[in-house]
Amino acid sequence: MHDKVVIITGASSGIGRALAFEFAKRGAKIVVASRSGVSDPELNKISSSILNVRTDVSREPDCASLIQQTVEKFGRIDILINNAGISMRALFSEVDLGVIRQLMDTNFWGTVYCTKYALPYLIESRGSLVGVSSIAGYKGLPGRAGYSASKFAMQGFLEVVRIENLKKGLHVLIACPGFTASNIRNVALSKDGTSQGETPLDESKLMSAHQVAVFIIQAIEKKKERLILTTQGKMTVFLNKFFPKFMDKMVYNHMAKEPNSPFK
């Protein structure tokens, strides 16, 4: 990864921030894309080759500017990691449709916009295109209609990009971390679009953002097409292929046990 130019969206916290630190330790040139655009003093101690770009991935002009500024600064793009994302927790029958639209704009369209403008440079460098998805992109999670929909859409989109560029040397990785200790659930949206505030999960029992970042980088190095993390995540994907009706009940029961679950 030494001297590779890496763009990471949603890089100010969680998995994105952990990825930035891990790439910095490996000598990469990092573009930190976040809505704040504020530099991270701790990250700056590790590397001087960092570009901070204020980016709201739900806005196409922001994504175009992100790619343009990267090329102007470093002259190339080797890796694009579409990590920016938001979640939700509410029954579909009760949720404001604006919440669904907001998740699609960030999780799906943000990936589409950034990929569209970065693709020529990634093909030129025979680089890697990464989407940080979720097990929710394989199995619909009750109470997360907008989140699952956006991740299913992201995965379908990235599969198409991979197939269309099979003979051009482009590497496409779909990474599904499973439940991870990050702030995505703390800032998840409720049915009316306000912040959920508190995560319903015990973060101490989840895989850390650092662990996820290391696994993703290893998958990029090995040119893997898919990465599914955690035993629970792997079992969910595997069993859903053969026993989807059984998994419907299992997922329902699991989510119903969450504190303050929207359904019982």
Image: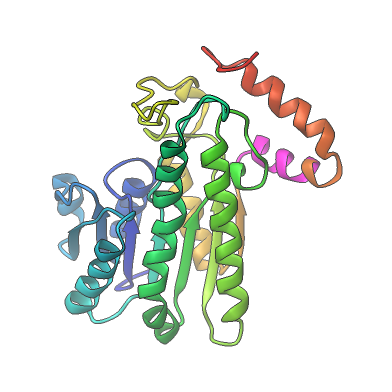
Q: Image quarter for residue 229?
A: top right
Quick check: 129 above or below 143? Answer: below
Q: Residue at x 35, y 46 (%)?
A: 18
| The N terminus lies in quadrant | bottom left
Q: Residue at x 40, y 26 (%)?
A: 192
Foreground residue among 16 and 147:
147
Quick check: 83 above or below 27? Answer: above
Q: Residue at x 54, y 69 (%)?
A: 172
The x, y position of residue 158, in whole percent, is: 55, 65
The x, y position of residue 169, in whole percent, is: 53, 83
The answer to whether any part of residue 26 appears in the image is no
The x, y position of residue 131, in whole percent, is: 49, 58
What range of the chain is rendered magenta?
230-239
Q: Main secondary structure of the magenta part?
A: helix
- Is residue 237 one of those drawn in magenta? yes
- Is residue 105 one of those drawn in magenta? no
Foreground residue among 74 and 260:
260
The x, y position of residue 178, in whole percent, is: 57, 39
Quick check: 207 above or below 216? Answer: above
| The C terminus lies in quadrant | top right
